[in-house]
Image (cartoon, rainbow, N blue to C red):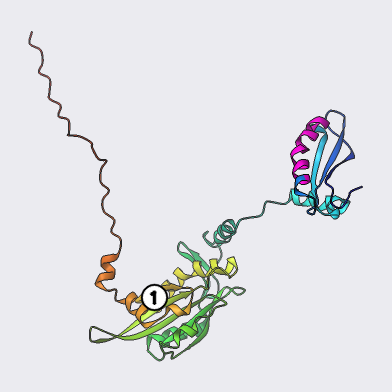
């Protein structure tokens, strides 16, 4: 009934009837991709005229077919399922939907192995070896700790710990997953040797699944609170997407901003009033009339 490159209209009658007693009809607009552009535009622009002349109230379903299978019973069934399915979410809507799962207060019972939800995010528990690594970092037994979230178990696990040089630090940042890092940056400043604990949240761009990005973002605040409760003082919090950012100059500037950098920060002045308001008007009291 259809030609490979020739657009056409096909009207197919259902057995069901509408409120007026007439039969319901299916309109198939056959417009294959290989058809001449002029032909496709002509048929597309005259479809509304055809419907009006035939009777729009008689047409119950419409299909725009571009391949032969679209104009079959199977194609019609796929069309029906697609019509009933909810509209696909945009990327932003998917992120908001995923975020909502972890923003609402939890009514579940709390133990050392269950997650809790706070106003600042989701608090996944630190496993015992992860807590132990924090205490060893506090005692300066080593200078680097890395954590990851176990998405299935909903816990924060230790990935590795030990001594890492500043030159090695960028290579510790994975490119295929998010991580939390603690680094004791030993450096000189104004003639003094200083140990500064830096918390680093690494997220390699937007290539990761939405759920993983949302969980790492939501767990960061509660994790920082947990680390402070364990006795760890964090001197600087950083968010990066690549290990190449972790240079000595970058860390020094973050910990000890230069006076010029502070001066270059935007200042927020009180907004000025509208111009040309004119002089203030003085209203003199009117003396009461003497009788």
- Residue extending farthest to the left is 290
Q: Is residue 96 visible?
A: yes
Counting from the top left corner in percent of width and height, residue 174 is at 53, 80
Which of 150/56 is in front? Answer: 56
Quarter where residue 193 is shown: bottom left
Q: Residue furthest top?
A: 291
Q: Is residue 47 magenta?
A: yes
Q: Viewed as shown, does residue 256 lie left or right of 240?
A: left
Q: Identify the magenta region.
A: 39-56
Measuring from the top left, give residue 46's x and y in whole percent: 77, 37
Q: Is residue 231 visible?
A: no
Query: In the image, is residue 68 part of the stretch drawn in magenta?
Result: no
- Give x and y (percent) for residue 108: 56, 64
Viewport quadrant of the C terminus = top left
- The residue positioned 39% from the left and 75% from the top of the image is 228
Lateral position of residue 270 relative to residue 288, left or right: right
Image label count: 1
The front one of 291 and 85 is 85
The image quadrant of residue 60 is top right
The residue pinned by badge 1 equals 228
Q: Nearer the viewer, residue 187 or 154?
A: 187
Helix, strand or loop at label 1? It is: helix
Q: Position of residue 14 (x, y in %)?
A: 89, 40
Magenta segment, principal secondary structure? helix
């Amino acid at each position: 009934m259809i030609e490979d490159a020739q657009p056409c209209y096909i009207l197919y009658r259902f057995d069901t009837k509408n409120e007026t007693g007439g039969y319901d009809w299916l309109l198939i607009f056959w417009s294959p991709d290989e058809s001449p552009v002029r032909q496709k535009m002509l048929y597309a622009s005259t479809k509304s005229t055809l419907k009006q002349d035939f009777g729009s109230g008689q047409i119950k379903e419409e299909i725009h077919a571009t391949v032969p299978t679209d104009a079959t019973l199977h194609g019609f069934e796929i069309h029906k399922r697609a019509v009933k399915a909810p509209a696909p979410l945009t990327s932003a809507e998917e992120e908001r939907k995923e975020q909502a799962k972890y923003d609402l207060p939890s009514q579940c019972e709390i133990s050392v192995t269950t997650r809790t939800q706070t106003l600042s995010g989701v608090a996944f528990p630190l496993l015992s070896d992860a807590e132990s690594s924090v205490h060893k970092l506090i005692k300066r037994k080593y200078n680097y700790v890395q954590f990851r979230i176990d998405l299935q178990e909903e816990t924060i696990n230790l990935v590795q710990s030990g001594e890492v040089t500043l030159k090695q630090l960028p290579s510790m940042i994975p490119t295929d997953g998010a991580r939390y890092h603690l680094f004791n940056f030993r450096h000189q400043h104004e003639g003094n040797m200083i140990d500064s604990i830096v918390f680093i949240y690494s997220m390699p761009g937007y290539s990761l699944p939405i759920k993983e990005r949302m969980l790492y973002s939501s767990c960061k605040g509660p994790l920082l609170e947990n680390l402070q409760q364990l006795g760890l003082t964090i001197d600087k919090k950083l968010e990066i997407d690549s290990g190449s950012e972790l240079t000595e100059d970058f860390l020094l500037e973050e910990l000890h901003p230069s006076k010029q950098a502070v001066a270059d920060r935007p200042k927020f002045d009180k907004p000025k009033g509208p111009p040309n308001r004119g002089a203030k008007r003085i209203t003199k009291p009117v003396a009461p009339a003497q009788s």
